[in-house]
Image: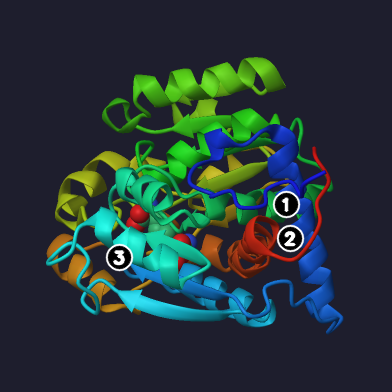
Amino acid sequence: MSSHFQGKSFLKEIDFSKKELETLIDLAAHFKYLKQKNIPHQYLQGKNIALLFEKTSTRTRSSFTVAANDLGAHAEFLGKNDIQFGKKESLEDTAKVFGRMYDGIEYRGFSQETVEGLAKYSGVPVWNGLTDDWHPTQMLADFLTIKEQFNHLEGITLAYLGDGRNNVANSLLVTGAILGVNIHIVAPKSLQPTSEIQALAQKKADESGAELLITDNVAQGVAGVDVLYTDVWASMGEEETFEERIKLLTPYQINAALVASTHNDQVIVLHDLPAFHDLKTTMAQEIYQQFGIQEMEITDDVFHAPYAHQFEQAENRLHTIKAVMAATLGHMFIPEI
Ligand code: CP
Ligand code: NVA
């Protein structure tokens, strides 16, 4: 009997079953406990991990680095300007070299095809640290956080407000559909998920019983939900759209009135981060100079409210990324599931 997940890549959620995603979430909770109790868990001793980043990162980079250290592996950061990749050397050639040197590869960047190509040509497990299409490691952390808050996942309803076409929205819709979590994407029509993504998610929802709602009606989208979730209005690489997005998405801001309109006093708020909730960054300052707004997708009072759990969510990136690396590459046995 072989260990489940062994040698597999983690490229997008749709490649995994409900049971598999639940197993990774529960394994992450186990690793969280081990770390809190200072119990060693060096399942990757002697392994070398490449961290390839074409976009910037705080949480994902730190999670892969700390998780690799905790698991006894060495992680090497390879920024897009540090290596030949793309400029002088093709994806295929780079992947073949990486596969001969590293035991596993993390990739964050633009194209989903790049992360799929790295997996195809390297022959080692590849983990998607965010592409334009999907953010799968974020999902494990998000649903772990929800499970910690509510003690279960099935039947929970999450409303995502904002750019409903970005990686996080796509991933929430499909992952919720797989896990049996009801997902509302609340966004203006021009920023709603593509019909392909909706069809993919609906197929999974038919299997799990999750209810999906895509709407531009905020009141309808948030009434009675358990979780409110938002993300930046313009993702990395599309910062030039801020002017248009501010116009389109201001009615979808998570503020105190919107939280109250859920009519659920147990509602929680999540954000994958980084967030535009004050003027303490240079980018927020620039936006303030140009458009006169101090907050975007989430107001500062909501960001600091006791029902906002974005920092637990951020910590859970570490434990969930550790679970993915250990399950796919570690000296550990997971029975067939
Ligand atoms: N949420 C997230 O992926 O954060 P980073 O961009 O900082 O990695
Ligand atoms: N949608 C955001 C997520 C950042 C973690 C982006 O792609 O920039």
Tell me the number on the disc at residue 25. 1
Label pair 2/1, CB-CB below 8 angstroms: yes
The reply to whether residue 271 is visible in this rendering is yes
Decide: few, some or many residues near mark 3? Use Cα within 10 Å; few <14, some 14-19, many ≥20.
Answer: some
- Label 1 crowd (10 A; few <14 / some 14-19 / many >=20): many
Structural distance between the alpha carbons of marks 2 and 1:
5 Å
Report how far apart the C-alphas of labels 2 and 3 lie in the structure: 25 Å
Dividing the picture into quadrants, the one containing residue 20 is top right
Q: Name the secondary structure under disc 3.
A: loop
Q: Where is residue 116 in the image (x, y as percent from the top left)?
A: 39, 45
Foreground residue, 303 or 140?
140
Residue position marked by numbered label 3 in the rendering: 55
Look at 62% across and 21% down and name the residue there: 205
Choose the circle earlier in sequence order: 3 or 1.
1
State which image quarter holds ligand 1.
bottom left
Say what amino acid the circle numbered 1 marks. Ile
Q: Is mark 1 on a helix, strand or loop?
A: helix
> To which quarter of the image does residue 299 belong?
bottom left
Q: Which residue type does callout 3 highlight? A: Lys
Classify mark 2: helix, strand or loop.
helix
At label 2, the amino acid type is Ala
Q: Ligand 2 near label 3 (Cβ, under 8 Å)?
A: yes
Q: Locate residue 197, reporting x and y percent.
A: 42, 26
The quarter of the displayed image where residue 326 is located: bottom right
Which numbered circle lies on residue 28?
Answer: 2
